[in-house]
């Protein structure tokens, strides 16, 4: 969430940044509404504070008037105090409603993109900032992952549709073991070599938790909501581990020496994929349920750029260990997600499409999420004293999604006889060096 005070202080700067995002008119109108509400708030606060000061002054006078035998004047002062208290209560109620509207309006504004984010309207304007590996040359026509998996008997979309409908999958045999092995491999990589602390979290979160990371209220249509409240609150299935993990320290004040925090978490993810009809509807690329290993950082503001670079490297390492060609893309202003200030996507090569496809988004949110969830830290102050609490910075990235990596493995490691070679890094986890028909 943007600080409403900062929005009201410099609305033109906010609007200019929103223009870079290609924000719609309703979003831009939110800036004007915050300016208007902030102005009203200032007037109400001033009136309330003046009444409080007058009440304090009158209260000091009343006792002296009684002692001096000037009862009528004292009673008049008491009546004025009572009248002022009534007005103060009215102002407090009005201020409370105004503050709620200010927050609700601010929640609808996206984060400000960083100055060096490239200008653009869509993914077509993203800028390649790195590449690794060389796409394999096949001496046969490479098949899409669905055909490879179904031919091997490890992917069963037909029975998945019988169970739950389209955009679900059933993995069998070595296919199921391969996905489980990927989870263990990524968790081991990030905990043993990159220093992350593994956490296991609930797969259900209350609405206020999803609001904290920016999924709500804007993206309610992309999430699955429970029909009945849970523990008295509206509850959703997690769309990504980012939501519960980033919220672990909501409403807390961390000490500077605790930072950075680095968490890795494996969860299923549930997404309605609203508005994506016709895109990758068959197979494992765009589904309603998938598994993912997520990386989350909480840092001091001055460290978040370095943390973002480390986060990207850690996600890249998973692809490198699996020897999957990929490229890294700095997202343009028009393609950067609602909550992110800066994002680098990793795109893995898919031979059947002769194209790179997104497999990880590594984002720096600055203090946008922390402000929404009141996640603060205490920076060091002068003379060894502790400073005033300030909002931390949060970051996250996929490290990596199992389904899309499985797609890349089936396609990049397929053989002419229909088998699929298992990358060296995974063989100790899978217990096999290839998947062949009948395995």
Image: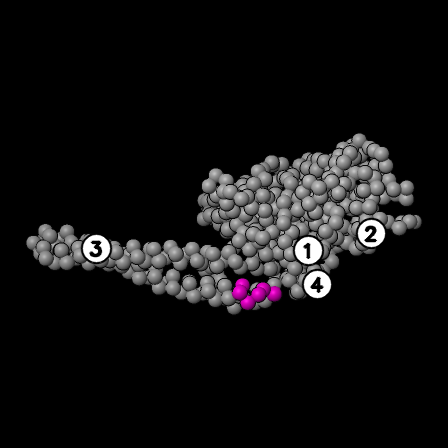
Q: Earlier in the sequence, mark 3 or mark 1?
A: 3
Q: Earlier in the sequence, mark 3 or mark 2?
A: 3
In this rendering, position of residue 82 left or right of residue 71 = right
| Rendering quarter of residue 401 | top right
- Cα distance in 3D space between marks 3 and 1: 63 Å
Q: Which residue is mark 3?
A: 82
Residues in magenta, as a range: 22-27
Secondary structure at badge 3 equals helix
Of circles 2 and 1, the one toward us is 1
Q: Earlier in the sequence, mark 4 or mark 3?
A: 3
Q: Earlier in the sequence, mark 4 or mark 2?
A: 4
Of circles 1 and 4, the one toward us is 1
Secondary structure at badge 4 equals helix
In depth, the one of 212 and 52 nearer the eye is: 212
Report the residue at 73% width, 52% height from top.
280
Q: Which residue is mark 2?
A: 352
Image mark for residue 216: none
- Label 1, residues with CA under 10 Å away: few <14, some 14-19, many ≥20: few
Of circles 3 and 1, the one toward us is 1
- Cα distance in 3D space between marks 2 and 1: 21 Å
Residue 362 position, x and y percent, is 66, 50
């Amino acid at each position: 969430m943007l600080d409403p005070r900062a929005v009201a202080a410099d609305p033109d700067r906010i609007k200019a940044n929103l223009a870079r995002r290609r924000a719609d008119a309703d979003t831009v109108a939110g800036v004007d509404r915050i300016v208007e509400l902030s102005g009203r708030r200032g007037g109400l606060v001033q009136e309330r504070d003046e009444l409080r000061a007058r009440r304090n002054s009158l209260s000091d006078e009343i006792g002296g008037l009684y002692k001096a035998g000037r009862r009528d004047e004292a009673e008049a002062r008491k009546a004025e105090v009572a009248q002022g208290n009534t007005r103060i209560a009215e102002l407090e109620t009005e201020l409370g409603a105004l503050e709620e509207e200010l927050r609700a309006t601010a929640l609808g504004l996206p984060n400000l993109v960083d100055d060096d984010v490239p200008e653009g309207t869509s993914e077509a304007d993203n800028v390649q900032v790195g590449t690794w590996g060389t796409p394999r040359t096949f001496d046969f026509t490479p098949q899409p992952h669905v055909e490879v998996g179904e031919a091997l008997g490890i992917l069963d979309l037909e029975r998945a549709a019988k169970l739950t409908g389209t955009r679900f999958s059933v993995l069998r045999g070595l296919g199921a073991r391969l996905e489980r092995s990927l989870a263990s491999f990524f968790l081991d990589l990030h905990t043993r070599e990159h220093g992350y602390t593994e956490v296991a979290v609930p797969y259900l979160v209350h609405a206020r938790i999803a609001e904290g990371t920016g999924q709500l209220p804007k993206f309610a249509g992309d999430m699955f909501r429970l029909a009945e409240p849970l523990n008295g609150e509206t509850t959703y299935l997690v769309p990504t581990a980012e939501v519960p993990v980033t919220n672990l320290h909501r409403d807390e004040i961390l000490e500077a020496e605790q930072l950075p925090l680095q968490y890795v978490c494996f969860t299923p993810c549930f997404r309605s994929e609203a508005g994506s009809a016709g895109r990758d509807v068959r197979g494992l690329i765009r589904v309603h349920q998938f598994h993912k290993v997520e990386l989350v950082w909480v840092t001091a503001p001055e460290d978040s750029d370095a943390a973002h670079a480390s986060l990207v490297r850690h996600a890249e390492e998973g692809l490198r260990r699996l020897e999957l060609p990929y490229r890294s893309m700095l997202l343009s202003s028009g393609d950067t997600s609602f909550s992110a200030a800066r994002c680098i996507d990793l795109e893995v090569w898919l031979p059947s499409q002769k194209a790179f496809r997104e497999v990880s988004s590594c984002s720096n949110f600055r203090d946008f999420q922390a402000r929404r969830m009141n996640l603060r830290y205490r920076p060091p102050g002068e003379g060894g004293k502790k400073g005033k609490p300030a909002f931390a910075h949060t970051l996250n990235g996929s490290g990596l999604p199992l389904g899309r990596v499985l797609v890349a493995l089936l396609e990049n490691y397929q053989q002419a006889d229909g088998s699929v070679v298992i990358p060296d890094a995974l063989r100790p986890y899978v217990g096999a060096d290839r998947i062949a028909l009948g395995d």
